[in-house]
Image (cartoon, rainbow, N blue to C red):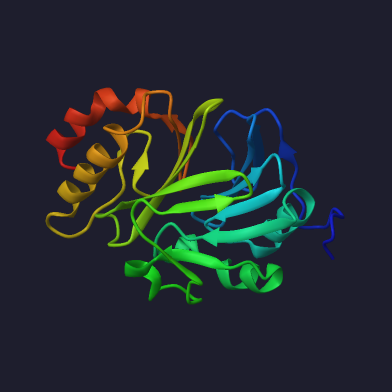
Amino acid sequence: RYGGVMTSDSITVDDTYTGHVAPGTAARRSLPAASIIKVSVGAMDNNCYLVTCASTGETLLIDAANDADVLLDLINRYAPKLSLIVTSHQHADHWQALAAVAEATGAPTAAHRLDADSLPVTPDRFLADSDTINVGELALRVIHLVGHTPGSVALALQSTDAATQLFTGDCLFPGGVGKTRRPGDFERLLGDVNTKVFDVYDDSTVVYPGHGDDTTLGAERPNLPAWRERGW
């Protein structure tokens, strides 16, 4: 059914990358050291990301959110060396396809321990703040961000020949941080985003959120005082 052959679940991957993907579409950004395929899946327009090392072909999947057949088809056509699946946080719209993709590919899974109990599979690896995830010759830094959920993680891919590529789950979007529910969570999340993201990475950093379009830290940085003032 797979094995690199187009199936009824196949979608075209657009190599003209703009940061926007409509529901049920995918696009690929090619960098010197890596390629990034962004695909929108499921009823909540979740973004999934396949981050592939240009040297080795090894790939990281960030959020097996939904539409397992679509993800498996993309993996087989573009990223057959899937070495790890990271779940950014515990909310169910980000892991509907996790069990099926993990079983079909045999790839190990990873998440933060504080969000792991809500996942359909027990992670093979528990992530912690400042951990490094190695994918071929790529290294991604784990950033633990508290507030949207207790165990949300962002992943920062840094290299010497491209801007930092930052995968933020539901913690940072164009126009604000992610939704918070309990008293104090907004302040915790904005505080973590300030100190662990905006204070560390420069304006050229590309932000890949869990839903919707990409942005950059430079585009969002001037709005931080307004976000704090409005309280969401």
Residue 64 quadrant: bottom right
- Residue 113, above or below 39: below
Lateral position of residue 231 relative to residue 44, left or right: left
Q: Position of residue 216 (x, y in %)?
A: 41, 28
Lateral position of residue 58 relative to residue 183, left or right: right
Residue 226 quadrant: top left
Q: How many marks?
A: 0
Lateral position of residue 27 relative to residue 130, left or right: right
Q: Position of residue 46 (x, y in %)?
A: 51, 52
Residue 109 quadrant: bottom right
Q: Nearer the viewer, residue 224 or 142?
A: 142
> What residue sits 43% from the left and 64% below the top?
111
- Residue 138, above or below 60: above
Name, please, the residue furthest toward the right. 5
Q: Nearer the viewer, residue 129 or 1?
A: 129
Quarter containing the N terminus: bottom right
Quarter containing the C terminus: top left
Q: Position of residue 150 (x, y in %)?
A: 27, 62
Q: Nearer the viewer, residue 193 or 14?
A: 193
Residue 65 visible, this orientation: no
> What residue sits 69% from the left and 39% below the top?
54
Q: Position of residue 174 (x, y in %)?
A: 38, 34
Residue 136 visible, this orientation: yes
> What residue sits 36% from the left and 26% below the top?
202
